[in-house]
Amino acid sequence: MPLPMIHILNGPNLNLLGRRQPEIYGHETLDDVARDCAALAREMGVEAALFQSNHEGEIVDMIHTARDAARAIIINPGAYSHTSVAILDALNTFDGPVMEVHISNIHKRETFRHHSYVSARADGVIAGCGTLGYQLALRRVVALLAT
């Protein structure tokens, strides 16, 4: 029997994680996040697949794919958090748990970052915990799937 699948979706500029503004986002790369989440997922009896795109429509397509392929979504929409009704609408078509992750604390940053459209759909939001936030989100979605 296949393990439950969790999709971890990442928005614009997260492909530069570890190289872009390390004073805000740290030195871990997206490959490090993928490795750490895959290892934790195995320990927890699920699978995790990480995806990234700099293009809003591709992220919408990833969410549509997750409707049939995943039991839960962890999403770091990056700057699209603050602008994308399209991503919110796509997430509203997904039936499983959704966790929103932000590496930095968006509430301590510029005012325009304080609002996230994605939060309206998210079952939880983790912000300001660095890349550890992905693992915290994974633990939470697994707990939600068990209920």
Image: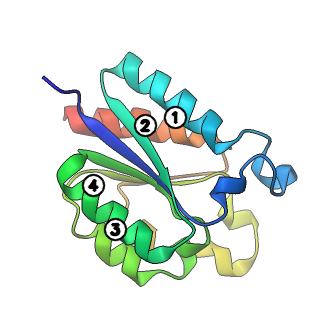
Q: Position of residue 61 (x, y in %)?
A: 34, 68
**Residue lying furthest right in this view?**
23
- Which disc number belongs to residue 66? 4
| Of labels 1 and 4, the one closer to you | 4
Give the structural element (helix, strand or loop) at label 3: helix
Quarter of the image containing the C terminus?
top left
Q: CA distance from mark 1 to mark 4?
A: 19 Å
Q: Which residue is mark 1?
A: 135
Residue pictured at 23% horizontal, 33% vertical: 4
User: What residue type is disc 2 on?
Assistant: Leu
Residue pictured at 47% horizontal, 51% vertical: 51
Residue pictured at 42% horizontal, 69% vertical: 58
Q: Are marks 4 and 3 in contact (CB under 8 Å)?
A: no
Q: CA distance from mark 3 to mark 1?
A: 24 Å
Q: Is residue 71 above or below residue 46?
A: below
User: What residue type is disc 1 on?
Assistant: Gln
Q: Are marks 1 and 2 in contact (CB under 8 Å)?
A: yes
User: What residue type is disc 4 on?
Assistant: Ala
Q: Which residue is mark 3?
A: 61
Q: Which residue is mark 2?
A: 138
